[in-house]
Amino acid sequence: MHSEPSNTPITHDRSMLCTLIVEKSQNPPIPHFAKKGLRTYCAIAFSVFVGLWGPNTFAQSETLADRVIEHRLDNGLTLLMVERHQAPIVSINLTFRVGSVNEHVGITGVAHLYEHMAFKGSKTLGTSDYETERVLLDKLDQLDQEILRERKNATPDNEKLKTMQQQFTELETKANALAVQNEFGLLYDSHGAIGLNASTSSELTRYIVSLPANRLPMWAAVESDRMRNPVLREFYKEKGVVLEERRLRTDNSPSGRMFEAFTSTAFWAHPYHNPVIGWPTDIANLTVSETQAFFKDHYGPNNAVLAIVGDIHPPDVIALIEATFGPIPSQPPPPPLVTVEPPQNGERRVNVQYNAEPFVLIGFHKPGVGHSDDDVFDVIDSILSSGRTSRMHKQIVQKKQLAIRVGSFTGFPGNRFPNLFVISAVPRAPHTTAELEEAVYEELDKLKTDPIESRELEKVINNLDAYLVRSLQSNSGLASQLTYFEAIAGDWNYLIEIRDRMAKITQEDIQRAANKYLVKKNRVVATLIKKTKKGSAQ
């Protein structure tokens, strides 16, 4: 027997958004509950029995597959729901199948920039006078394009540019004065929401929040309005924010510089080489029209997956989502990604000089999600670097004492397409990155010939089970897993099948994959070389 949902009845008045905005100052804030950590779950999940959900909630024979309710709107939006009535709370994850792989040279960073812009509101939220603001924003956009054209002239007219820039500053000041700062976030805060956040990756853009269950109608009204009526207000100001973010996280960060150089060296053709945050000149020159066109191509309901997990009654939720998101028209399918990375036929190396301690990244090309060898690399990853009893930690960190730390991860920079298995390592002085590399290759070679002990394979599955107990026991974790696999693999049921597939992986599978992929000609190496005070490299 299912317990009755404790939230108040859901209504479907299409005018509720304006009503809720009026009410936001009248409703007292609802106490926050404990904030859960946010994470992108990348590779592993399994069919979970009811012990994860809590006692006396469901029949003991029910699995995750029995609990997920799926509904598809006529406009293509996929809705996934799981009832959990332990507390009057819901966690929501709205994921779009769009990221830096959907960009091209000239507009890199546009997906990440739009994530920023989405929090600026809509025609209803974030403005004190949208009709006046709209006129100013249109004039700004036209003037911005005129300035860009003039700058691209062989002999730009500097006086003309100066005049246009002054006009631009005046218009921008007037437009920004009509923006209501953080009205979007304040509305959520006033209704007891926590964890309001978003993220952009190479393949996905995700919007998340947890809130009291009886505030779900407010969320649906606000988010459907944001999907239907986005406004790129404070666009030029936000480009400056993103450029500063890039300077902080990439240009002035040793790890940021390393990963950018590593990725662009590994992928010559496939758009995985695009940095998620974008190249500086592309960010600086992005226009409103380009961003609007990108939004139209990729942010339609037919390119989105919505998961709602918590204290819900699914028939009411379906009616609510149909009423709020259903009227949003479907868009033509986004342009397909047809570029395939050619096989690598020789080791690639790149050095990055920076005033920081050396470290090394070693990557090997491998298949993406859905390929049987992708599962094999999940097992290899666990054997090599999961915990203090893993092979690389015992041999390289503890026994040989060559490294401060050494680890691995799979599915970089994304999982949907063929990607990289990566090993990262930091040498322990006075040892060098070259010594560390050789030690890593010794451990990889052992995978090709030496027996894999049964206890190592058992440990992989035990670690997997423990990981999933942790990740799926929270509403937000389960919502993230469901949307991730639906968006990346094309079916959330993929997460149910992974554990069984990994449990069937044998020593022969590991040796075959190691001999096929963990070879020199398939290898990419990036090394951070520390600069001396005089500017030379050590």
Image (cartoon, rainbow, N blue to C red):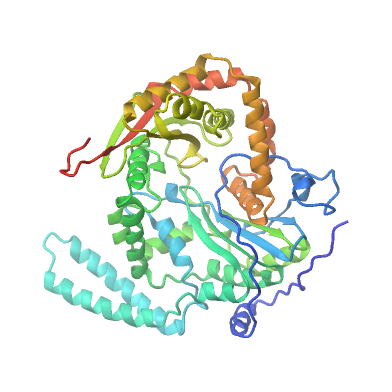
- Residue 422 lies, with reference to residue 391, above or below; the image says below
What is the quadrant of the N terminus in the image? bottom right
Mark yes or no: residue 79 visible: no
Q: Residue furthest right?
A: 1
Q: Is residue 77 left or right of residue 183?
A: right
Please tell me which residue is depicted at 47% across the width and 22% down the height of the picture.
Answer: 444
- Residue 392 lies, with reference to residue 326, above or below; the image says above
What is the quadrant of the C terminus in the image? top left
Mark yes or no: residue 174 visible: yes
Q: Nearer the viewer, residue 443 or 422?
A: 443
Q: Is residue 408 left or right of residue 301?
A: left
Please tell me which residue is depicted at 84% across the width and 43% down the height of the picture.
Answer: 61
Please state the horizontal and vertical placement of residue 393, each as a whole percent of the image: 49, 30
Please state the horizontal and vertical placement of residue 402, each as a whole percent of the image: 39, 28
Please state the horizontal and vertical placement of residue 118, each as a whole percent of the image: 48, 66
Q: Nearer the viewer, residue 376 or 89?
A: 89
Q: Is residue 366 left or right of residue 528?
A: right
Please tell me which residue is depicted at 20% across the width and 41% down the height of the picture.
Answer: 532
